[in-house]
Image: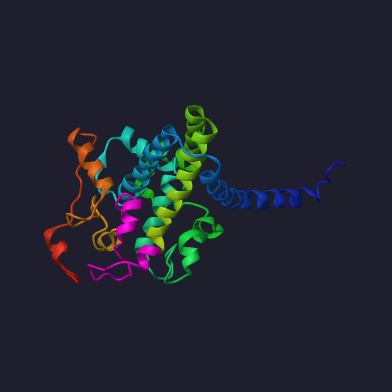
Amino acid sequence: MAVTPAERPAKRGLFRRALNYFPRVMFGLMHVAALGVVFFFPPSWLDLTLFLTIYIIRGFGLTAGFHRYFAHRAYQTSRWFQFCLAWFGAMAVQRGPMWWAGHHRAHHKFSDLEGDPHSPIVRSIWYSHIGWILSDELKDADRETMRDWHKYPELWWLDKYDWLPGVLTAAFCYAVGGLSGFFWGFLLGTVLLYHATFCVNSVCHLIGFRRFETTDRSRNNFLVAIATMGEGWHNNHHHYPSAARQGFKWWEIDMSYIILKVLSQFGIVWGLRQPTPRALASKLIVK
């Protein structure tokens, strides 16, 4: 039966609503499938190698790329490598670099106040951990917030097609390791990296220790720091957001910064910003 002109707007509205729910359905299905990986696909050495390698690449893309570079400009690099950082981060299927960094800038501007996209103090723990990334309220990137990146159209192209790196990563894992490689290298790694990243938003504002007095309730958490390659030193970060490193003590392991230091030896990145001695000594709570 043909659709009349009067019925077309309603049909289009139904289609748009279905598209809005599609990411949420896929997000849930990925979690269900990830639970089945352990029971139905015992890992081979190839699976574990895929899992660890791709986890580190994507984790570095999020921490050193989306966060420390695009959100905070904590160091400098070339145009080709900044696109690599954007691509590596988008492989994690946590939206695009401009969307991610833009909302993170809002987090710092309104940390634990109204306007913070994912505060467990203002909203619920559930919303700060998962709900915010699925919310229609935060669907689009704020181009004005990210105006310092307007001159790089390739970054905005990637932000528009942020699904592409994830799809290609999944295809690569399947091509190399078959179905087991896909489940371990892509699916399980994606879900675990989701929750490691989200713990910075939720856990690191509730559980851990505070070294510095800040206007929010950010905390340092050792376990989250290990899972996120250094992002768990969250109170340190909120005290001095523009630093390329977040582990301020020798024992505060920050794998992303270690990798950046290695890359700086080859001239791939440079100008790694450091917290000043005055900043390290100010408002010290725990020595």
Q: Is residue 2 above or below residue 142?
A: above
Residue furthest toward the right?
1
Q: Does residue 132 sit above or below 284 in this rendering? A: above
Q: Is residue 216 magenta?
A: yes
Instruction: Point out the image quarter for the C terminus.
Output: bottom left
Q: Which quarter of the figure has residue 113?
A: bottom left
Q: Position of residue 162 (x, y in %)?
A: 49, 41
For the stretch drawn in magenta, what is the main secondary structure?
Answer: loop
Residue at (25% x, 63% y) in the render: 239
Name the residue nearer the viewer: 47 or 107: 47
Q: Nearer the viewer, residue 273 or 88?
A: 88
Indicate the position of residue 279 as horizontal and vertical percent values: 16, 62
Q: Say which residue appears at 41% left-offset and 63% top-offset.
A: 202
Residue 161 seen from this side: no
Judge whether 29 appears above or below 163 on screen.
below
| Quarter of the rendering occupied by the N terminus | top right
Image vertical order of residue 132 relative to residue 91, above or below: below
Left or right placement of residue 167 versus residue 193 in this view: right
Residue 35 visible in the picture: yes
Instruction: Name which quarter of the figure residue 240 lies in.
Output: bottom left
Residue drawn at the location 34% of the way across and 43% of the way down: 60
Q: Which is more toward the observer, 44 or 60?
A: 44
Where residue 71 appears, x then y in whole percent? 34, 51
Please report the bounds of the magenta region as a residue range. 203-230
